């Protein structure tokens, strides 16, 4: 059955756009690493695509699968090849050094830096150089059913992105209607923002065509440190972490294949559920029967555990490309 993208929850549309971007984002020699609902304190995007240098991405894997936050990055990027007092290695952070020491303790516990004590002095040494793996950051807002008021609202948000240039490009993804996006809607968007028309092909996979190409946002990224923190969030979280915020332990929860994407489906509601409704307060929620978990389904644990494992495997595979 073909999926009508204009009628699916935005959550499902986002997952399809993320999977399309992971598979088909047009980059020459780079790899697309994709995250969903990632951002900064003031701005969160539906989809973020990090165009990564393949060798740099492989070198980044040396630091583990979890994101490095700003404090950990400060330590990891400045840790020297030879043992050194941490205050000689890390630039003055502009806040008390004890916070740097705490970050060193966390970094050492995660094995992303080496730490030792010489008398009263804490010394650090790197495990490997932290690579330059981020080439470009692309932000995408998803709105399957774009109308005039949504275009105005998104226009304001994308205008902010253009102004701040935190990403290198900003796009709006909307469901293809078979016709060009109305010029009136395009007028509400900043001219630098691109427009992607998303459709589902005969093989069930989502694909996207550029209706309007995005322009580069500013001559240079405004804030390289913040872009790297954003890229690390994308690396650590990916776009399949919705199993952590929905209820795969509900007996009605299913993961359905839509092309090569796996998206949540609610058997009780007989439709794709929204992320918000798939929670413990859902009136149709029913826990998995204990017997499902004890029969070793399909290897061990119930379907909910298996879904988690399946999505984690896909996320790891995407990072290793
Ligand atoms: S019944 Fe509610 S909690 Fe269970 S899968 Fe459906 S939406 Fe999610």
Image (cartoon, rainbow, N blue to C red):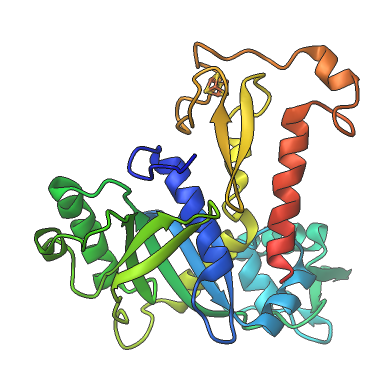
Position of 127 relative to 272 (above/below)? below
Q: Residue at x 30, y 79 (%)?
A: 217
Q: Position of residue 49 (x, y in %)?
A: 49, 67
Q: Is residue 226 left or right of residue 101?
A: left
Position of 14 relative to 85 (above/below)? above
Quadrant housing the C terminus = bottom right
Decide which of 91, 53 is in the foreground and name it.
53
Q: Position of residue 106 (x, y in %)?
A: 74, 57
* Count of numbered labels shown in the rendering: 0
Q: Position of residue 150 (x, y in %)?
A: 20, 48
Q: Is residue 303 left or right of residue 100?
A: right
Decide which of 227, 89 is in the foreground and name it.
227
Decide which of 83, 142 is in the foreground and name it.
142
Q: Residue at x 32, y 82 (%)?
A: 216
Q: Residue at x 50, y 22 (%)?
A: 270
Position of 283 relative to 99 (above/below)? above
Decide which of 182, 81 is in the foreground and name it.
182
Image quadrant, ligand 1:
top right
Q: Decide if residue 95 is in sight here.
A: no
Position of 30 relative to 239 (above/below)? below
């Amino acid at each position: 059955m073909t999926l009508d993208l204009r009628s699916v929850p935005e959550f499902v549309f986002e997952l399809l756009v993320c999977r399309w971007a992971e598979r088909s984002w047009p980059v020459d020699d780079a790899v697309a690493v994709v995250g969903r609902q990632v951002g900064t304190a003031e701005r969160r995007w539906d989809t973020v695509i990090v165009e990564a240098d393949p060798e740099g991405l492989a070198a980044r894997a040396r630091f583990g699968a979890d994101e490095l936050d700003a404090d950990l990055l400060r330590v990891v990027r400045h840790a020297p090849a030879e043992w050194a007092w941490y205050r000689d290695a890390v630039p003055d952070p502009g806040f008390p050094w004890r916070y740097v020491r705490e970050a060193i303790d966390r970094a050492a516990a995660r094995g992303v830096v080496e730490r030792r004590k010489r008398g009263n002095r804490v010394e650090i040494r790197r495990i490997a150089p932290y690579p330059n793996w981020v080439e470009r950051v692309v932000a995408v807002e998803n709105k399957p059913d774009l109308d005039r008021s949504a275009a105005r609202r998104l226009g304001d948000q994308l205008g902010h992105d253009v102004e701040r240039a935190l990403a290198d490009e900003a796009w709006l993804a909307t469901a293809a209607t078979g016709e060009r996006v109305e010029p009136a809607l395009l007028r509400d968007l900043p001219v630098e923002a691109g427009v992607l028309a998303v459709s589902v092909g005969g093989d069930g996979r989502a694909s996207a065509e550029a209706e309007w190409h995005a322009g580069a946002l500013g001559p240079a990224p405004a804030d390289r440190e913040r872009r790297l923190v954003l890229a690390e969030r994308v690396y650590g979280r990916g776009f399949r972490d919705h199993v952590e915020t929905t209820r795969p332990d509900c007996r009605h929860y299913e993961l359905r294949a839509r092309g090569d994407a796996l998206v949540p489906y609610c058997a009780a509601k007989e439709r794709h559920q929204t992320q918000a409704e798939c929670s413990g307060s859902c009136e149709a929620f029913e826990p998995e029967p204990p017997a499902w978990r004890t029969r070793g389904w399909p290897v061990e644990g119930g379907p909910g555990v298996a879904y988690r494992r399946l999505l984690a495997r896909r996320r790891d595979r995407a990072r290793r490309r």
